Image (cartoon, rainbow, N blue to C red):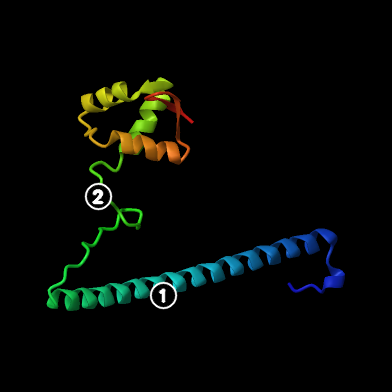
Amino acid sequence: MNKTLDSMSAEELYELARQREAQEKEHAAQERREQLEALQVRRKDMMARQAAELAAIDKDIQALGGRTAPRRKATAKGGEGRGNGNPNLSRMVVEIINEQGEMSTKALKSRLASQGVETRNISQTLAYLKRNGRLRNTGRGIYAAA
C-alpha cells in the first residue's frame, strides 16, 4: 500500500525517516567494509611483492659473498617480533602485581619461577610495562600497578 507523503501521519513519516536513516547507515557501513577489504588485499599484495624483492636482493648479495641480515619472524599481532621466550610474560607480570598491589623484583621473580616461568629477561619486561604506563615504580626495585 503506497501512500503519498501528504496522506501519511506524522508517526508514519517519522517511521519512514528512521527506516531510511537505517538504510543509509547500512549502505555506508557496507561501503566502508568494501573499502577495507580492498585495502587489505592491496596490502597483502604489496607485502608479497616486497618479500619477493627482498629475497631476490638477498640472493644477489649472497652470490657476491656478502651476508644478509636474518629475517625476523612476525608475531601473532602481525608485527616484527624479537622472539621472546614467553609472550604472555607481560600479562602475567601485570596480573601478579595487580593481585599483590605492590611487589619487589625479587619477589616477582620468585613467584614466576614457582609457576615454571622463565624469568631471565624480567627487567626488560618490567621496563617495557613501565614505559607503556601499565606499571610504576614506588621504590628501587618495587613495582605497583599504574
83 up-or-down from 2: above or below: above
Q: In the drawing, does residue 17 fall left or right of residue 26?
A: right
65 up-or-down from 106: above or below: below
Depth check, mark 1 against mark 2: the one in front is 2
Residue 113: x and y, percent? 22, 27
Q: Amino acid at mark 1?
A: Arg
Judging by the rendered image, the residue that carries numbered circle 2 is 83
Residue 41: x and y, percent? 40, 73
Quadrant housing residue 2:
bottom right
Q: Amino acid at mark 2?
A: Gly
Circle 2 residues within 10 Å: few <14, some 14–19, many ≥20: few
Which residue is at 42% across, 21% downward? 102
Residue 30: x and y, percent? 55, 68
Which residue is at 82% across, 74% downward? 4
Q: Secondary structure at mark 1?
A: helix
Quadrant housing residue 49:
bottom left
Q: Secondary structure at mark 2?
A: loop
Judging by the rendered image, the residue that carries numbered circle 1 is 42
Q: Residue farthest to the right?
A: 6
Q: In the drawing, does residue 83 fall left or right of residue 98?
A: left
